[in-house]
Image (spheres, rainbow, N blue to C red):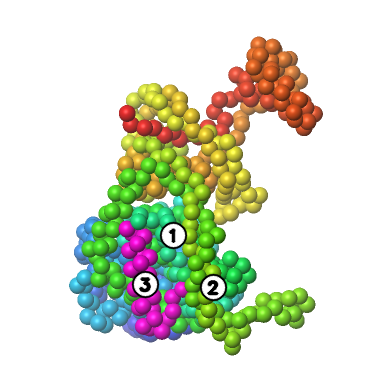
Amino acid sequence: MKLIFFVLLLIFSLQNVKAQFDGNTTPTYEELIEIYEKLDAENDEIELYQMGQADYGLPIYVCIINGAQDSIASFEKARNSTTLLINNAIHPGEPDGVNASLIWINNWIKKGKKTEKLPVIAIIPAYNVGGMMTRGSSSRANQEGPEQYGFRGNAKNLDLNRDFIKMDSKNMFAFAKIYHALDPDVFIDTHVSNGADYQYTISHIASVRERMAPDLGQLMHEELIPHLENCMAKNDFDLIPYVNQKGETPEEGIVVFNDLPRYAMGYASLMNAMSFTIETHMLKPFPQRVQATLHFLEGAISWMSLHQPEIELARKEALHWEENMEYYPFNFKASEKKDSILFKGYAFSHPISGLTGLKRLKYHRDQPYEKYIPYYNEYLAQDSTFIPDYYIVQSQCEDVIEKLDANNISMRRIEEKGTILLGRYKILRFESPKKPYEGHFLHSKIEKEISLIYKEFKPGDVIISTHQKNKRFIISVLEPDTPDSYFAWNSFDSYVQQKEYFSSYVFEDKALEILEKNENLRLEFEKKKANDTEFANSARAQLTFIYERSEFYEPSHNYLPVYSGMEE
Ligand SMILES: [Zn+2]
């Protein structure tokens, strides 16, 4: 009796959840996985796989539609054909994609599960499992529904959408496994936006075109995005680039978002996927946002169905483009060059606040406008670095080697020691914040110096060729001065700390001896003393100047355990 009751309750609750995909509720993690397990059990064309653990201790799944009904064969099919990867609930307070994906699957089943020309569709039902578990109704203070939803931080209170390079979460190791098993052509990360008020229900961030392979950039920006705009318009939704405001309101212009590799979409862009973050607007009701997300997914799928040969060709050409790249451009910044874009906004004013007695910003929804606003859509690289044939990472950097390995980077362990001419990296300058950001003191304004030395390497050190897939990923993490390098994310902090010092009262006499024996150094020292008052007034600074130029100063200070080399 108890069992029958339980089964009935389960059936009832499943139907109940099913009926509510397009209402104002979103499933819990347990409900969601139950739904996907049921879809997997009832449909040959739908497969569900556990791909690793989240920090919370529960699995992260990927659902594959139109695979090959076998895990190895399905991933192989995905890698070798046109594949879409949709990532949901990286921010579980923004669950629009969770519901939209379920509606898309239900509609597809209802329409007869057609697979002809359909790309392989992979869906991560819920990426931030820990955040899904912290459910409530108030953490998204400015958002219109759903009734209950998860929290942004994961079990370790990390924002997983900043974790794609530093990989502090187990979630990201699972994601890397999913990502490289599929090698998707198009990637969509689903979100809900904060920020200004305007008429649009949905906006998108696309891969920065200037960073993409030319043919792939053209395909995405001149064909895929216009197709998406048309599809959305047919369903009465306008699509606008993400409203990344230059000033207080959109009227001052919007700037294309810089999709750095720390973000899900930036990571996918770096791997030559046509990559999107979609952002529905927080002040639109949840069911409406879910519909907009659904139509975006439908648009992407319909375009991919129509253009598989072009997509495959452009992706292949992207690999050639990457292979031929001699310099890696980085530190991209939006230029001051303005384009304009038709924008549907709301008029605004600055009345006096009844609360603070100060001016406040108020949008007037009863005064919609449609006009051209400035659009800053040109990105320029501020720096570039020469690409070596290979890197050597010393064996003690286990965490770095583990991350490279998790990203499918092939490398070779050195078996016998030897000496070779290598580029050695010295960190000259960098800045760090006073407070941690996502568990790190992320360095910026990094300056490096590369010098050639004959370096002895040891068994266990690894050689990483840059003549392989995902070349730009390798460079962007190992060249220390790029904005999302492993150095920037603190993997090599111990190397920029001096380990030995001197006592001034002892070193005084030695310093004098050093100057007596080194005429050039003495002249350099005297010149600095004459020209630099602060230096002239600091005994410690003067002694440090001589110490750092003497044999007593440790030769390893500020040098990284990473080297670069050229094939002969
Ligand atoms: Zn988000």
Dot 1 or dot 3: first in sequence order is 1
Structural crowding at the residue carrying mark 2, measured as other residues with C-alpha within 10 Å and reported as few (<14), some (14–19) or many (≥20) = some
Q: Is residue 95 magenta?
A: no
In magenta, the rendered stretch is: 215-240
Q: Nearer the viewer, mark 2 or mark 3?
A: 2
Q: Position of residue 405 (x, y in %)?
A: 37, 45
How far apart, in angstroms, are the residues tagged by discs 1 and 3? 16 Å
Q: Work out whether residue 324 can be spotted.
A: yes
Q: Which residue is mark 3?
A: 226
Dot 2 or dot 1: first in sequence order is 1
Q: Quadrant of residue 254?
A: bottom right
Q: Is mark 2 within 8 Å of ligand 1?
A: no
Find numbered disc 2 in the image and state the secondary structure of the residue it sits on. Answer: strand
Q: Position of residue 456 (x, y in %)?
A: 42, 24
How far apart, in angstroms, are the residues tagged by discs 2 and 1? 20 Å
Q: Which residue is mark 1?
A: 208
Q: Which residue corresponds to the image point at 19% horizontal and 72% vertical from the top-left?
A: 116
Q: Is residue 224 magenta?
A: yes
Query: Amino acid type of disc 2?
Result: Ile
Find numbered disc 1 in the image and state the secondary structure of the residue it sits on. Answer: loop
Q: Which residue is mark 2?
A: 373
Q: Which residue corresponds to the image point at 34% horizontal and 34% vertical from the top-left?
A: 413
Q: Which residue corresponds to the image point at 76% horizontal and 75% vertical from the top-left?
A: 358
